[in-house]
Amino acid sequence: MRWFTPGEVIVRREVLHGKVWSEMPTRVVVDEPGLLAVFVEPGTRLTYPDHHHPHPWDKPERGFWRGHGKLMLHRPEDAYSVDLFWKGDDRVFGNYYLNLQAPYRRTEDGFETLDHALDYTMAPDGTWEQRDLDEFEEQVASGKYSAQEAEAIRAEGQKIEKMLASGEIWWDTAWADWHPRAEWR
């Protein structure tokens, strides 16, 4: 698979049970052997193809990305991304969002993954919390994940908890000061 060029628009697809579940265009920030960083620009259109397991975001009010966008940091083989969010009129850094998902797989026009619903947030001061456990368990019960997949996702969550509790994160906190290029707007 090819390397993506900074500034290039590629597609992030979620694939559930062998079928595309959602699609989101992203802008490449960095693509190198240890890191794929992509940005979801404000106003980005989100799409949800027909699927036997409806996507929870497939609602008219969730058709476009709002806010300041989000920066997503992916390492090869990690079963999560580190997403950065900003808030307010002054675009102040808000938090890191560790989004459990299948390790990404490159495609010719982007990459594929699958959101695992279970998440963690970490504030700039290092405090953190688990998120969406109820949603994850509902998705397990509905058949989105097998028992084996659910156990692997829970184990990944435990690894993330240990990392966050130790304060030994792998990403550079300078990403919190990152700004998209003006010409991308």
Image: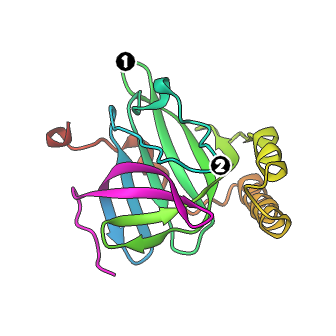
Residue 8 visible to an observer of this rendering: yes
What residue is drawn where x is 85% and y is 65%? 147
- Residue under numbered circle 1: 89
Mark 1 lies on a secondary structure that is loop
Which numbered dot is residue 131? none
Give the amino acid at mark 2. His
Task: Answer above or below: position of 1 versus 121.
Answer: below
The disc, 1 or 2, on the residue closer to the chain's N-terminal end is 2
What residue is drawn where x is 21% and y is 44%? 181
* Residue farthest to the bottom, as pictured: 1
Image quarter hosting the N terminus: bottom left
Q: How many marks?
A: 2
Q: Position of residue 57 (x, y in %)?
A: 56, 36
Highlighted magenta segment, given as a residue range: 1-28
Q: Position of residue 35 (x, y in %)?
A: 43, 68
Q: How are the colours assigned in the image?
A: rainbow
Q: Nearer the viewer, mark 1 or mark 2?
A: 2
Give the amino acid at mark 1. Asp
Q: Nearer the viewer, residue 61 or 174?
A: 61
Residue 108 lies left or right of residue 151; in this view the side is left
Mark 2 lies on a secondary structure that is loop
- Residue under numbered circle 2: 53
